[in-house]
Amino acid sequence: MPGAAQTDSRLDRTLLALSDPTRRRLVERLGRKPQRPTDLGRGLPITRPAVSRHLRVLRNAGLITAAPQGREILYRLAENARGIDEARAYFDRVSRGWDQALSAFKRFAEMGDST
């Protein structure tokens, strides 16, 4: 099933990219507006090369894009971040399983209260 392997790979890249708190902060900042790397790193306790490495991971996961803006590069959230859609679908599937398990536990607990 080649499609599933590709999906898992994209999902893995997305989850790995978002597993780092610094990368999540960069994504949050880009969610507000497109920015240059120097602006993105401002206020973070990391070096410029570290910001570049984090941006590369996010770009490779397809979560952000980079576009030349004169002599600068402007980063923004990817318009079609399929990895986010796949992560959302994954969490929806997993949460349905948890919801069903919790509902079953609730019914079991309520049956014990009535005896």
Image (cartoon, rainbow, N blue to C red):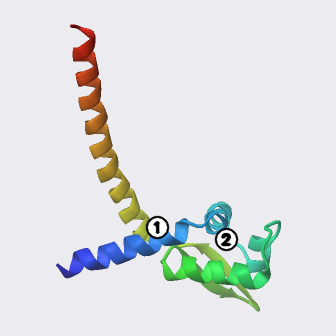
- Residue at 38%, 70% (x, y): give it: 11
Percent of width and height locating residue 26:
66, 67
| SS at badge 1 | helix
The answer to whether 1 is drawn above or below residue 31 in the figure is below
Q: Quadrant of the rendered structure where residue 105 is?
A: top left
- Image quarter (top left, top right, bottom left or bottom right) of the N terminus: bottom left
Horizontal relation, residue 59 to residue 2: left or right: right
Residue linked to disc 1: 15
- Image quarter (top left, top right, bottom left or bottom right) of the C terminus: top left
Residue linked to disc 2: 34
Give the alpha-carbon distance from disc 1 to disc 2, as whole Å: 22 Å
Comparing marks 1 and 2, which lies closer to the viewer?
A: 1
Horizontal relation, residue 65 to residue 34: left or right: left
In this view, the residue farthest toward the right is 43
Of the numbered discs in the image, which one, if any, rests on residue 37? Answer: none
Q: Residues within 10 Å of mark 2 (few under 14, many from 20)?
A: some
The answer to whether 110 is drawn above or below residue 47 in the figure is above
Percent of width and height locating residue 12:
41, 72
Question: Of callouts 1 and 2, which one flags the residue occurring earlier in the amino acid sequence?
Answer: 1
Q: Between 63 and 13, which is closer to the camera in this rendering?
A: 13
Q: Between 105 and 72, which is closer to the camera in this rendering?
A: 105
Residue 21 in sight in this render:
yes
- Residue at 32%, 73% (x, y): give it: 8
